[in-house]
Image (cartoon, rainbow, N blue to C red):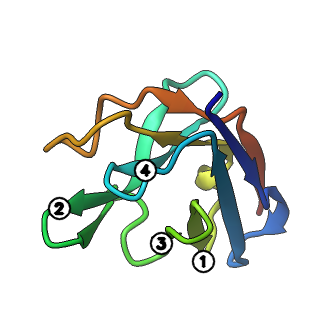
Amino acid sequence: QVQLVESGGGLVQAGGSLRLSCAASGRTFSNVAMGWFRQAPGKEREFVAASSWSEGNIYYRHHADSVKGRFTISRDNAKNTVYLQMNDLKPEDTAVYYCAAQSRWSSNPYQGYVYWGQGTQVTVSS
């Protein structure tokens, strides 16, 4: 059974940093995309970042415009874990953050995620 378990959320002041982790189990995800999404109260879930795989064992990072330069996605395939380093946090980053993974290779790292974690709350105070 595939499981994605997020950790690292919490309450932080504006300008602060947090590092989210997502530990996967049940299968390996080294050759598929893994990503982070978030959902703020009253809003739809939105894409935050993804780490996609390409032939030649090349990994690409994709970040939403709203977090570029502040958030960085990374992965450790040996640990089957993906991370989201969040710096210079703003109150508008407050949301539940979800880890997700695709089930097979796709050319689109922004959609088509099959596996989802339960989410971790990030709250940024002003």
Q: Closer to the observer: label 3 or label 1?
A: 3
- Examine the image and state in which quarter residue 13 appears: bottom right
* Identity, as a three-letter code, of the amino acid under mark 4: Met
Q: Residue at x 67, y 28 (%)?
A: 41
Give the percent coordinates (x, y) of residue 33. Answer: 34, 50
Residue bearing mark 2: 54
Q: Is the C-beta separation of discs 1 and 4 under 8 Å?
A: no
> Considering depth in this image, is 108 or 57 the residue closer to the camera?
57
> Considering depth in this image, is 79 or 111 the residue closer to the camera?
79
Considering only vertical position in the picture, is 117 above or below 34? above
> Considering depth in this image, is 20 or 81 the residue closer to the camera?
81
The 10 Å Cα crowd at callout 2, few under 14, some 14 to 19, many 20 or more, is some
Q: Closer to the observer: label 2 or label 1?
A: 2
Residue bearing mark 3: 74
On screen, residue 9 versus residue 21, left or right, reads right
On screen, residue 83 versus residue 15, left or right, reads left
Q: Earlier in the sequence, mark 2 or mark 3?
A: 2
* Identity, as a three-letter code, of the amino acid under mark 3: Ser
- Give how far apart the Cα atoms at labels 3 and 1 are: 18 Å
Q: Earlier in the sequence, mark 4 or mark 2?
A: 4
Residue bearing mark 4: 34
Residue bearing mark 1: 88
The 10 Å Cα crowd at callout 3, few under 14, some 14 to 19, many 20 or more, is some
Which quarter of the rendered picture does the C terminus lie within?
bottom right
* Identity, as a three-letter code, of the amino acid under mark 2: Ser
Q: Closer to the observer: label 2 or label 3?
A: 2
